[in-house]
Image (tube, rainbow, N blue to C red):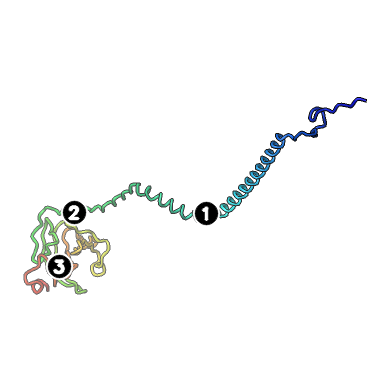
Amino acid sequence: MPATPVPPAGRGGTPGRAGPGRRPNKGISRVCGIRLQQEERDNVEKILISLIALALVFSLAACGKDGETEPVLSEPQGVEGEAENALPEEEAQPEEEAEPEPEPTEEPLPTPDPEPGIPAPAGWPEDIPTPTTGDILGGVWGMDRSDSIFYTTDIASDIDAYCRRLESYGFLRQEEHDYGEMWPDVKVYSNGRWDVMLPEESDTFNYSYVTYFNFYPLFDAVTEGYAGQPEDWPEEGLS
């Protein structure tokens, strides 16, 4: 019988088997080695990436713990910062000028009656004007029951007109005074230095024309003296 021919290695024969006297394929081995090296590098890169990710996670956790105390510490700094920032704004704002307080209005001083008064008797105080009409029926210094000195006189004149004249010289009507017990039915005018007392008109006496006047000094007229005093005052003139 004729012999059966054997096909060459690698061609139609059993794969992976080399014929006698043939070497394996080196290209295939090199490709497999490169693939193994690439897989190892990929695995190393994955491990490194995992380690880096873990490190970032731990770092962020640590930063989070440290950051929890920051709001407490930063609040005062924030307040101070706001105050520092507010100061320039406040300084930049113009200060409101305080409105000046209204000055107290002074009441106009009374204008003295320009009419000349009738001549005054000796000892009449110059601070007290005399009436413009009528007569002054004498005058004398005396002392009342309380040992207060006063100048007394009788005047025959228009009493209402004389009261208006006193007001023009700064004498004001005193609604309350201390002369009521000793001198009932009187009205008093004062300039703060002299009290001028005259009786009120009553049903019994008509004081509208002739009446007496008393002048009480509100200072020590004996020691200090006064304008219009007689010579050798108080020895002369004070009885």
| Label 2 vs label 1, nearer the camera | 1
Q: Quadrant of the C terminus?
A: bottom left
Say what secondary structure mark 3 lies in.
strand
Q: Earlier in the sequence, mark 2 or mark 1?
A: 1
Q: Name the amino acid, label 3.
A: Tyr
Distance CA(mark 2)–CA(mark 1): 79 Å
Q: Earlier in the sequence, mark 3 or mark 2?
A: 2
Q: Which mark is residue 110?
A: 2
In this view, the residue in front, 34 or 214, is 34
User: Where is residue 152, by image quadrant?
Assistant: bottom left
The count of marks equals 3
| Label 1 vs label 3, nearer the camera | 1
Report the residue marked by disc 3: 151
Q: Quadrant of the N terminus?
A: top right
Residue 166 screen position, x and y as percent: 17, 57
Q: Name the amino acid, label 1.
A: Glu
Q: Are marks 3 and 2 in contact (CB under 8 Å)?
A: no
Residue 163 screen position, x and y as percent: 19, 57
User: Where is residue 185, by image quadrant?
Assistant: bottom left
Residue 67 screen position, x and y as percent: 54, 53
Residue appearing at x 16%, y 58% in the figure: 209
Report the residue marked by disc 1: 70
Alpha-carbon neighbours of circle 2 within 10 Å: few (<14), some, or many (≥20)?
few
Residue appearing at x 40%, y 49% in the figure: 86
Residue appearing at x 17%, y 62% in the figure: 211
Alpha-carbon neighbours of circle 3 within 10 Å: few (<14), some, or many (≥20)?
some
Alpha-carbon neighbours of circle 1 within 10 Å: few (<14), some, or many (≥20)?
few
Whether residue 224 sits left or right of residue 30 in the image: it is left
Say what secondary structure mark 2 lies in.
loop
